Amino acid sequence: MYAVVETGGKQYKVSVGQTIEVETLPAEVGDSVTLDQVLLVAEGDQVQVGKPLVAGASVAGTIVGHGLHKKAIIFHYRPKQRYRVKRGHRQAFTRVRIDEIKA
């Protein structure tokens, strides 16, 4: 059984026991979280596709931790203008373990 959920403007294909990294969620480590924006639920040959969401479906998970992704370097450069800007960015994320898919 798997589901496709939307959180943080991105879509994730999840199954029970899987750990995913999503955009930062405002909760503490060990808290349970419910992802209710379920776009698709599939179990065997039965597939429920939402229009746009599957009615009554949700995905329950537990927050495992928070962290930062690897640094991305942003470099702007204009030739012959003596213009150079170098910046770095580390995007924050929340690691969530999927516990249950309710359909």
Image (cartoon, rainbow, N blue to C red):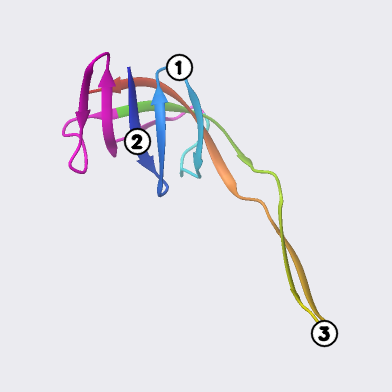
Mark 2 or mark 3: whose residue is earlier in sequence: 2
Q: Could you say which is closer to the camera, residue 6 or residue 47? A: 47
Q: Is residue 54 magenta?
A: yes
What type is the residue that disc 1 sits on? Gly
Q: Which residue is mark 2?
A: 5
Q: Position of residue 45 (x, y in %)?
A: 23, 15
Q: Secondary structure at mark 1?
A: loop
Q: Which residues are magenta?
A: 30-58
Mark 1 or mark 3: whose residue is earlier in sequence: 1
What type is the residue that disc 3 sits on? Lys
Q: Quadrant of residue 47?
A: top left
Mark 1 or mark 2: whose residue is earlier in sequence: 2
Q: As drawn, is 32 to the left or to the right of 1?
A: right
Q: Which mark is residue 80?
A: 3
Quarter of the C terminus within the rendering: top left
Residue at 71% over, 49% down:
71
Q: As drawn, is 66 to the left or to the right of 99?
A: right
Q: Quadrant of residue 44?
A: top left
What type is the residue that disc 2 sits on? Val
Q: Position of residue 23 (x, y in %)?
A: 49, 45
Report the label total. 3
Q: Position of residue 48 (x, y in %)?
A: 20, 27
Q: Which mark is residue 17?
A: 1
State whether residue 25 is above or below residue 65. Answer: below
Cα gap from disc 1 to disc 2, whole angstroms: 15 Å
